[in-house]
Amino acid sequence: MSPIASNLQVVRRQIADAAHSASRRPEEIRLLAVSKTFGADAVLDAWRAGQYAFGENYLQEALAKMAAVAAAQADAILEWHFIGPIQSNKTRQIAENFAWVHSVEREKVARRLSEQRPAHLPPLNICLQVNVSGEASKSGAAPDEVASIARAIAVLPGIRLRGLMAIPAPADDPARQRSAYRPLRALFDTLNAEGMALDTLSMGMSADLAAAIAEGATVVRIGSAIFGGRTYAPAVSADA
Ligand SMILES: *Cc1c(COP(=O)(O)O)cnc(C)c1O
């Protein structure tokens, strides 16, 4: 078994254990393999081990990787998720090439993605990124803006608002990890109580997936625990 295949087994086991500890079913939690900085060979290695949803942060790197995967393995049908910062002038390529975007933080970006989503594709699945760490993070909508952005974008035809995403400031202690995710879960519950039909809480990375699952994560975004440490910056990080 390849190292990536065996890492995937370990991560799936961690997800199942965390789900059971939280009295949840493991099937409620999807694993997104974050392949940024790793090549098409690593993606295909994971695909052969049964993984088909992949997360990417850098647009040019992702497009090159998609092409390389398709060239190497034409029958590999993968689901690509964009999880990085979005520049307004890059929305068209995102709308054309991804199934999901987790990192929408402004209404304007959602409108562009909706307008630019090709008509022959299903609506682009969207999560609103929320800044749950205040000053510690510059990314994400402020929690008190999220309801109005969500209401404004829920009606757009080219996208489908699925839920919320957060990247809290790193913390080692599981109790602190959980308390960072709790406000996102509370916001999610509030929006659903107001009538939104959100089904996705994208939260949890390699270092805190158990805490995120305990707080209700439905998608965990796992990079280094699957692919190993990221030892080099992507060649095209300037387009992030
Ligand atoms: C890189 C990244 C991840 C994965 O992080 P790991 O710690 O390697 O699991 C998850 N989410 C986002 C938004 C990322 O940029």
Image (cartoon, grey):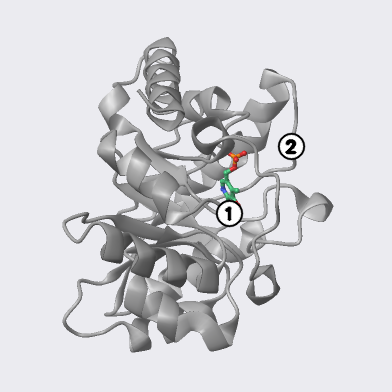
Q: Crowding near pointer 2: few (<14 within 10 Å), some, many (20+)?
A: some
Where residue 155 appears, as percent x and y from the top left, is: 32, 76
* Dot 1 amino acid type: Thr
Q: Nearer the viewer, residue 30 or 166?
A: 30
Q: Residue at x 70, y 74 (%)?
A: 238
Where residue 5 appears, as percent x and y from the top left, is: 37, 28
Q: Is residue 96 left or right of residue 119?
A: right
Residue named by callout 2: 170
Mark 2 or mark 1, earlier in chain: 1
Among the 4 quarters of the image, the one containing residue 78: bottom left
- Name the quarter showing ligand 1: top right
| SS at mark 1 in the image | loop
Instruction: Tell me if I can see residue 148 in this picture.
Output: no
Residue named by callout 1: 37
Position of 205 relative to 72 (above/below): above
Among the 4 quarters of the image, the one containing residue 9: top left
* Dot 2 amino acid type: Pro
Outermost residue, front side: 72
Position of 25 relative to 131 (above/below): above
Q: Residue at x 49, y 49 (%)?
A: 35
Instruction: Tell me if I can see residue 73 in this picture.
Output: yes
Which quadrant of the rendered structure holds the C terminus?
bottom right
Q: Residue at x 64, y 37 (%)?
A: 229
Outermost residue, right side: 135
Q: Is residue 28 left or right of residue 42?
A: left
Q: Nearer the viewer, residue 82 or 182?
A: 82
